[in-house]
Image (spheres, helix red, strand yellow):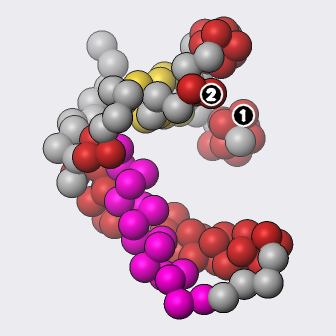
Amino acid sequence: MLQAAHAQLGGPISLVWDSLPEHISAEMRQWIDAQSNWLLVYRLPPYAPDLNPAEGLWSNLRAKVLNFAVHGIDQLTTLIKNRLKPLQYRPDLLNGFIAETGLVISDPV
């Protein structure tokens, strides 16, 4: 997904990532190091939902899918994609998810 985003956006990507075991594995660290010319990873502490902007996004999404029943993973995938799509056109909302963490995003020196 990150490679596809990089190819589509054509520029560097800053990624704020939690400490899920898969995200901090030796294999993943090697892959991230190999992408250092376009990928900058900010790691969150092991358990820090209050610092994770994705928590705000998932909370928002849960409110939009709460009252839906689905009949399989394909239908669930479609529902989630349909609810996530409009968010890409709401930079104010996405910036709000970051702002509520209290984190400051700046260009690396």
Q: Nearer the viewer, residue 17 or 91?
A: 17
**Residue at the (58%, 33%) spot, across then down:** 11
Q: Above or below — where is 3 with respect to 52? A: above
Which numbered disc, 2 or 1, marks the residue that appears first in the sequence? Answer: 1
- Residue 8 position, x and y percent, is 70, 45
Q: Are marks 2 and 1 in contact (CB under 8 Å)?
A: no
Which numbered marker is on residue 3? 1
The magenta segment: 52-68
Question: Residue 22: percent from the left, percent from the top?
Answer: 62, 27
The x, y position of residue 82, in whole percent, is 64, 77
* Quarter assignment of residue 31: top right
Q: Quadrant for the N terminus, please.
A: top right
Q: Main secondary structure of the magenta part?
A: helix
Task: Look at the image and say whether residue 34 sits in the magenta stretch.
Answer: no
On the image, which quarter does residue 2 sit in?
A: top right
| Residue at the disc numbered 2 | 22
Query: Does the rendering let one see residue 35?
Result: no
The amino acid type found where label 1 is placed reads Gln
Rendered view: 105 above or below 25: below
